[in-house]
Structure formats: C-alpha cells, structure tokens
Image (spheres, grey):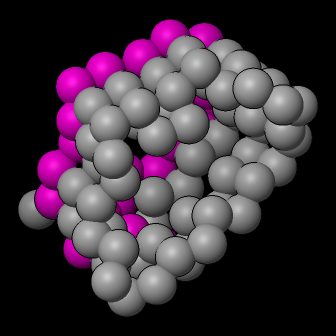
Amino acid sequence: MPSVGALIVAGDAEVTTTGNEFLNGCSVLTALDLTPLAHVGALGNLFLNGCTGLMTLDLTPLTHLTSLGDWFLGGCSGLTGLDLTPLAL
C-alpha cells in the first residue's frame, strides 16, 4: 500500500456500509476523517485492522452507526483515543 498519513474519505448519502477489509493493514495511516460517511450504519469485518500508526479515531460523524464487524481496529497498537459515541444507547 502506498504511504499515507492523513486520509479524508469521500462518500455520499448512498453509502451505508463499508466493505470488509476497509483500509486493512494500512500501517502508515495516522489520521482518518470519516465525516463524509455520515450515513454508514455498519463497518465491515477487518475495518482498519492492522493500522498500527493510527493514533485516534472519531466515530461521532457516523450518526447512523449500529454495527461493527469482526476485528474492528484489531492490532491498532498505536491507538490512544477512540470515540464510540454513536454506539451509545
């Protein structure tokens, strides 16, 4: 995978789920803006799995999020901040 630092994901109202292995193994990724994916309700299996460089992840823009796939953020050893507010009951 090419070298990536920060990534802004493009999306629209039609996107309701990420596929399996979305950015799986992208170890150089340090920041991710998911704001354009506000209508995503489910994150697929291996979502950001192995992204060891990822330090924080803010899921608050995903206001429709109800489901996380297997191995969600698995192996993200650099993660120091995570906001799961959309999943709160």
Q: Position of residue 77 (x, y in %)?
A: 60, 12
Is 52 placed left or right of 13 in the picture? right
Q: Is residue 30 above or below residue 61?
A: above
Q: Is residue 22 above or below residue 34?
A: above
Q: 89 or 78: nearer the eye?
A: 78
* Residue depicted at 17% across the width and 50% down the height: 67
Q: Position of residue 31 (x, y in %)?
A: 74, 46
- For the C terminus, give its image quadrant: bottom left
Q: Is residue 12 above or below residue 24?
A: below
Image quarter of residue 35: bottom right
Would you say the magenta stretch is mainly helix, strand or loop?
loop
Q: Is residue 25 above or below residue 23?
A: above
For the record, the magenta segment spans: 61-87
- For the N terminus, give its image quadrant: top right
* Residue depicted at 35% across the width and 74% down the height: 15
Is 41 placed left or right of 89 in the picture? right
Residue 79 painted magenta: yes
Would residue 78 be visible to someone looking at this image?
no
* Residue depicted at 34% across the width and 60% down the height: 85
Please identify the residue farthest to the front as the structure is shown: 1
Please identify the residue farthest to the bottom as the structure is shown: 13
Please identify the residue farthest to the left as the structure is shown: 89
